[in-house]
Amino acid sequence: MAASQRPTERRASRCTPVTARATLVFEIAGYSLHKGMGIGKFIWSTTVSVGGHQWCILYYPDGDTHIESQGHISVYLELLSKGAKEPLVETTAITVEVQMPPSDLAENFRKLLEAAEEADMTFEVEGEIFPAHKIVLAAWSPVFKAELSIAFHGQT
């Protein structure tokens, strides 16, 4: 199989975020009995594992330590696993083979030589005239290339 007919391999990859879901119900029974615990004091839920990380809910009945939360309850979702903030992704490799058609450059050159249109030189052999293209002849023969390079540069 010629080099131009080898299949070309195209590779791509896809990065898809992996989503994990869980439901954690944290019921606060006797809400009013927890009021007055103190600012910054909290109750935490049981932990839940989601996406390989441990989470819990923190409930501050008198607000956390921020001034603006005083007089209000505060509820937070807390990540308990340290150093686990990297996103989870699934990588999928995609390989596609593209079959290249065979090169028809030689056939195109042959047709160009046989066609008289746009020929930039002619040969006369035993009374028969042959149209030609300098660039094609130079590509096929180092002798023509050397001879025609003089003509290409405007010298005779």
Image: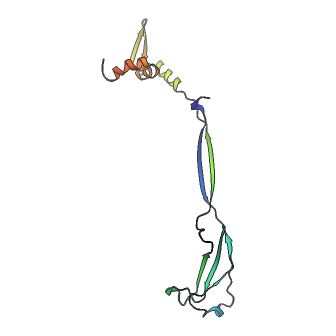
> Do we see residue 139 in this rendering?
yes
Quarter of the image holding residue 38? bottom right
Residue at point 64%, 64% (across, down)? 19
- Residue at 54% in and 27% down: 104
Q: Position of residue 30 (x, y in %)?
A: 68, 91
Q: How is the image coloured?
A: rainbow
Side (left or right) of 134 relative to 76: left
Q: Quadrant of the C terminus?
A: top left
Q: Residue at x 52, y 27 (%)?
A: 105
Whether residue 118 is visible to the viewer of this picture, yes or no, is no
The answer to whether 10 is drawn above or below residue 14 in the figure is: above
Residue 134: percent from left, percent from top:
40, 21
Above or below: residue 11 compared with residue 23: above
Q: Position of residue 107 (x, y in %)?
A: 53, 23
Report how many numbered discs are placed on residues in the image: 0
**Pick the front one: 82 or 14:** 82
Q: Quadrant of the N terminus?
A: top right
Residue 9, quarter of the rendered image: top right
User: In the image, what residue occupies the spot 63% across and 72% down?
Assistant: 81
Residue sitting at the far left: 155
Image position of 91 with respect to 149: above or below? below
Q: Is residue 140 left or right of residue 57?
A: left
Q: Is residue 53 above or below residue 131?
A: below
Residue farthest toward the front in the current orientation of the protein: 82
